[in-house]
Amino acid sequence: MLDIRILRQDLDAVVTALARRGFDFERERFEQLEARRKELQVRTQELQSERNTRSKAIGQAKARGEDIAPLKAAVGQLGEELKAREQELQQLQSELEDLLLQVPNLPHTHVPVGPDETANVEIRRVGEPAMPDFPPRDHVDLGLPGGWLDFEAAARMAGSRFVVMRGEMARLQRALIQFMLDLHTREHGYQEVYVPYLVNPGALLGTGQLPKFDADLFTVVSEQGFRLIPTAEVPVTNLVAQQILDAGDLPLKMVAHTPCFRSEAGSYGRDVRGLIRQHQFEKVELVQIVRPDASETALEALLADAEAVLKALELPYRVMLLSTGDMGFSATRTYDIEVWLPGQQAYREISSCSSFSDFQARRLQARYRPGPGAKPELVHTLNGSGLAVGRTLVALLENGQQADGSIVIPERLRPYVGGTERLVPPSE
RNA sequence: GGAGAAGUGGCAGAGCGGUUGAAUGCACCGGUCUUGAAAACCGGCGACGGGGCGACCCGUCCGAGGGUUCGAAUCCCUCCUUCUCCGCCA
C-alpha cells in the first residue's frame, strides 16, 4: 500500500509513476473521496469533542449532587448527528482504503519502462550453455525411465499440472532442498524457519496477493477462509506483521522451504508439458527484513545469494532486470534469474528477487525503532527464490544429460545423494 | 470435542460506569551527583490519525467486532488467542 500522505502531497508524481507501469490511477475518484473525507472527519471530530466536554460536565454536576436531567436532554440531538457522521466517515474511509489496496507499488527509478517482458534488460550472463554432440532431450523425456517423473499417474489422481516422482528422482529433489537450505544457512547467514502452509486472508492482504489476485490462489473450504500459500513469502514475511522490531534485530534474514500452490488460472496452454508450471511445487525462499536505507544493497546481496546456488550447481544462467510492465504488484524492483534449459534451447525463470520498499510493511504494520526513544518506522521487505526446486530439477536433468540418457550430478550435490555421481536410467 | 480462567503501554502489573491514555515497578531518554561508572535523586517517556504556516489544538485506541449509556478499560453479546483440567489423537 502506498502512503496516503504522498498521494495528498504530490499526486501528480504518483500518477505519473504508476502510469509508467501501466496502471491507470483513478485520480478524480481519489480527489473526491479525499475532499469528502477531510470535511467529514473534521466535522465528526468536532462533534466528538463536544460530546466529551458535555459528558464531563454531566459527571461533574452529578458529583456536586445537581440535577443532571436537563444537561442530558441537551446532548440528545448531538448524539444523533454524531452517530450518523461516524458511520458516514467509516464508510468513506473503507472506500478510500479499498481504492488504495488496489494500487500497485511505485517502480524504482532505475526500472526500465516497458509494456511487458520484452522490455526487460539483461544484466549479465554466467556460465556457458553446453554444446552437446547429440540432440538434447527435455526433462519430460529424461524423466521417463523407471517412472522417475510420472505425469500420468499424477493426472489420474489429481489432474494436469501435478507430478509423481519416484526413486532417485524423488531423492534428488529432496537433496536439492537440503542443499539449498544448508547453503543459505551456513554460508549466507539466513535463519531457517518452518511456517504454516495455510494462511488467513489477512496474511495475504499483507503481502499483496489479496485483494486483487484471489483467482491465483487455492482456497480451502473453512471457517477461517484459509488459502494455500502460493509462496513462502507470505508466511515468512508475515512473521514481522504487527511487530515493532529493535534496530539491532535488523537485518532479519530468513530462509524457508515450503510447497507452493498456485491455481494458474489464465495460463491455459502455457507450459502444460512437464514440471515448469505446476499447481504444487517446492521452493526455497529467501526473505529479508531491513532498514529502509539498507534495502538497495540488500537486494543485490539477496540476488547474489540466489545466484550462488546456480553457480554451485554449475548451471548457466542470466540475470534480467524486469521492466515496469513485467513486475509484480507489490514490487518496486525485481531481478529474475533465468536458467539455461537445453531441452527448450531457452533461458527460463528459476528465481525472482524483489524489493518491496515499505509497500508490504505498511500493509503488515511491520516497523522498527531506529533508536532508543525514537518513533517507529516502517521496515523494508525483500524476497527471492533461492531457488524454485522443481525448475532446478529440470535444469539439472537437462544440463546434466549424457548421450546415453544418464544424468551427471554436480559435485557439490553428490554428498546429498549418497555420493552418487550420475543417475543411470533403470533398464526395463 | 467438553468444562473452567484470562487477555490493559516495550515488559510486569493496578484499575468503584464519570475531569483515566490509564496507578505502580522494570526498561528506556535527559539531568544532578561522581575523576569515570554504578547507586541515589529530579524530570521525561505509548501508538495511530486529523486540523493549523506555527506555538499548538483535536480525535481514536485497554485482544477484535457489535451493543447499552449523556459518558465504557470497567456492563451485555459474538468472535479470536492463551492457560488449566477431561476426552481423543499423528
Image: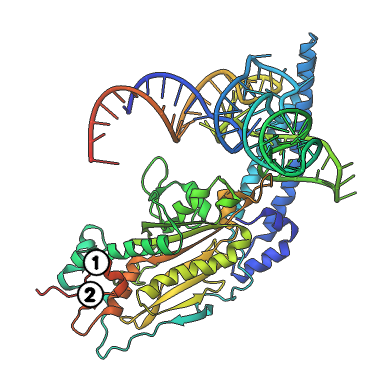
Query: Is residue A362 left or right of A421 when viewed as pictured?
Result: right
Q: Indicate the secondary structure of the residue bearing disc 1.
A: helix
Judge if badges 1 and 2 mark residues of a common chain.
Answer: yes
* A314 shown above or below A82: below
Compare residues B76 and A246 and report the one nearer the observer.
A246
Residue A68 falls in image quadrant: top right
Q: Amino acid at mark 1?
A: Val
The x, y position of residue A280, in whole percent, is 33, 60
Chain for disc number 1: A
Calculate the distance from the C-alpha at mark 1 to the C-alpha at mark 2. 9 Å
Q: Local crowd at mark 1 within 10 Å, few (<14), some, or many (≥20)?
A: some
**Which part of the image, by quadrant, shows the N terminus of chain A?**
bottom right
Query: Is residue A367 left or right of A266 when viewed as pictured?
Result: right
Judging by the rendered image, the residue that carries numbered circle 2 is A421
The answer to whether residue A279 of the structure is visible from this angle is no
As drawn, which residue projects farthest toward the left? A428
Query: Is residue B21 left or right of A302 when viewed as pictured?
Result: right
Residue A165 falls in image quadrant: bottom left
At x 40%, y 79%, the residue is A347
At x 79%, y 26%, the residue is A53
Chain for disc number 2: A
The x, y position of residue A100, in whole percent, is 61, 54
Indicate which disc residue A84 carries.
Answer: none
Judging by the rendered image, the residue that carries numbered circle 1 is A417
The x, y position of residue A374, in whole percent, is 69, 47
